Amino acid sequence: MIELRNVAKRYIRGDQTLTVLEGIDLKIAEGDFLALMGPSGSGKSTLLNLIAGIDRPSEGNIIISGIDISTLSDAELARWRAKHVGFIFQFYNLIPVLTAYENVALPLQLTDLPRAERHRRVVHALTAVGLADRMGHTPNELSGGQQQRVAIARALITDPDLIVADEPTGDLDRQSATEILAMLQRLHRESGKTILMVTHDPKAAEAARAIIHLEKGQLESAPC
């Protein structure tokens, strides 16, 4: 499903060039669940953002389901991302003034789905993450684990092929983190989603099928 060919990412700062990733060759099978690990500054989040179409490589190609997303225009990339990628972040990125229902429904505003179908999907997604009784609550009325469940429901609402999670348990206590990781494993097992998760926590990484290690912008290991 995902193939990276000689991918590099560099940033220009004044007269200096900062190389974050260099010579990345990687293949990820459809339906896999991988954890990206490495020390701070190793390029984990940058690699995740490139695969998710949030950022563009300085060099190389990123091919997902036969589409070279590195060649798409900004508008094409935005449409591709909205259709194919679901995002889960460490700090949830929920809109404080909106309810759980309204936060999950947001991505569907960009679709042509009828109102009744949007409602059905939101209710189904929140029920799937165990929050059927919290739909009308705003984020500040929910625990950290519940907010992350809302974020997972939002990531799933458009039925994307790829779920990218950047430190999804980094702001949670151990019990909540364990519950979130179990939920991601269930999604992987039952719905066949491809999941890429950045984490610094070895315990969290154990939830994935395999681990990719990055060191100083280069792959130290790749999935088997």
Image: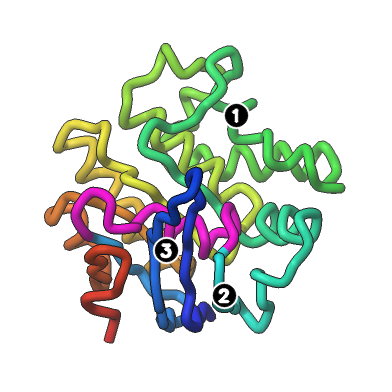
Marks 3/1: CA distance?
22 Å
Image quadrant in which you'd find residue 189? bottom left
Marks 2/1: CA distance?
30 Å
Residue range highlighted in magenta = 38-56
- Where residue 45 appears, as percent x and y from the top left, is 39, 52
- Where residue 214 appears, as percent x and y from the top left, is 26, 66
Above-or-below relation of 153 to 70: above
Furthest residue in direction bottom, as rendered: 224
- Where residue 123 appears, as percent x and y from the top left, is 60, 37
Q: Are marks 3 and 2 in contact (CB under 8 Å)?
A: no
- Residue plotted at (20% across, 45% down): 178
Q: Which residue is mark 1?
A: 103
Q: Which residue is mark 2?
A: 62
- Residue plotted at (80% across, 54% down): 75
Q: Is residue 45 magenta?
A: yes
In what element is the residue under mark 1?
A: helix
Left or right placement of residue 47 versus residue 107 in this view: left
Left or right placement of residue 124 versus residue 192 in this view: right
- Where residue 90 appears, as percent x and y from the top left, is 36, 37
Above-or-below relation of 6 to 48: below
Mark nearest the camera among 2 and 1 is 2
Badge 3: few (under 14), some or many (20 or more) residues near its Cα, within 10 Å?
A: many
Marked residue nearer the N-terminal end (2 or 1): 2
- Residue plotted at (76% across, 55% down): 74
Asked whether residue 128 is in view, the answer is no
Towards the viewer: 79 or 184: 79
Q: Which residue is mark 3?
A: 195
Badge 1: few (under 14), some or many (20 or more) residues near its Cα, within 10 Å?
A: many
Above-or-below relation of 67 to 107: below
In what element is the residue under mark 2?
A: strand
Left or right placement of residue 142 versus residue 5 in this view: left
